[in-house]
Image (cartoon, grey):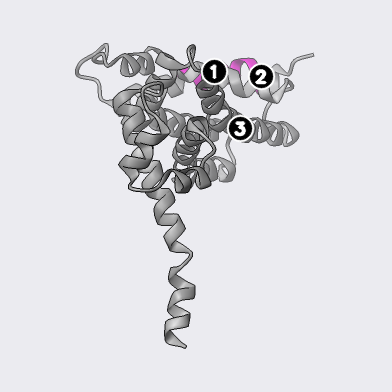
Amino acid sequence: MPNAGHALVSSPSAPQRKRRQVLDAASSLFMAQGYGATSMDAVAREAGVSKATLYAYFSGKDALFAAIVGEACSRHAEAGEAGHAEEASDVTEALREIGRGYLSFLFRQDVLAIWRVVMAEGPRFPELGRAFFESGPMRLLGWFSGWVRRRQEAGALGQGEPMVMAEQFLALLRTSAFMRRMLGLPAADDAASEAAAIEASVDAAVVTFLAAFGPRRALS
């Protein structure tokens, strides 16, 4: 009985371990070699699994890349920024929480690496851009537009299309500070910390967003 019980506990983790091996190997190869130069054969070799095992988990490179992006987004959500924004009673502070979380996420080296791969190779591989867009930006916009709608219903935000409002707030956050990091350039002010750059971008975005969509500026 103990052996049977042990098998029941340990057997589900074996597929999870193999899936983890595949994701880690694919992420390493995508970031080092690029999307186009990475083959499923190479991923299988790097992960130490058979091609049959690899295809049992992922139908192709686009599915692999989507899973990598989705995992990054899940880690971001699990870090608690979204939960804090839901709990905050003041819409200004809630927007600041969302902005800080979003930029802290974008400034991570692994996330910047994903963006660089997509920007460099997306035009040649439409499936790459689609996988990234659906698993990353659209996933976030789906949650954030829902948050905007709930705040509108509570009277904390003015009228407007929630998806458009969500897109515009996130666009306001992607300032030159983000572009510099994407390009590997130093900060405009070498003495400025990353935290200070994030706070400055967030403060400006929140002020501009509320000027357009605050409750006193409801659109007709």
Question: Pointer 2: residues within 10 angstroms few (<14), some, or many (20+)?
Answer: few
Element carrying mark 1: helix
The image quadrant that residue 76 belongs to is top left
Nearer-N-terminus badge (2/1) = 1
Residue at image location 54% in from the left, 38% down from the top:
59
- Residue 126's tag is 1
Q: Which residue is mark 2?
A: 164
**Outermost residue toward the bottom in this view:** 1
Element carrying mark 2: helix
Q: Which residue is mark 3?
A: 144
**Outermost residue toward the left in this view:** 191
Instruction: Give the Cα distance between marks 1 and 3.
Output: 26 Å
| Residue 108 visible | no
Element carrying mark 3: helix
How many numbered markers are drawn? Answer: 3
> Which quadrant of the rendered structure holds the C terminus?
top right
**Outermost residue toward the right in this view:** 220
x and y, in percent, of residue 171 in the image: 52, 17
Q: Nearer the viewer, residue 87 or 3?
A: 3
x and y, in percent, of residue 106 in the image: 40, 27
x and y, in percent, of residue 42 in the image: 35, 34
Nearer-N-terminus badge (1/3) = 1
x and y, in percent, of residue 170 in the image: 53, 22
Q: Are marks 1 and 3 in contact (CB under 8 Å)?
A: no
As drawn, 75 above or below 117: below
The magenta segment: 204-214
Q: Amino acid at mark 3?
A: Phe
Q: Nearer the viewer, residue 181 or 59?
A: 59
Q: Nearer the viewer, residue 9 or 148?
A: 9
Q: Amino acid at mark 1?
A: Pro
- Residue 99 in magenta stretch: no
Q: Nearer the viewer, mark 2 or mark 1?
A: 1
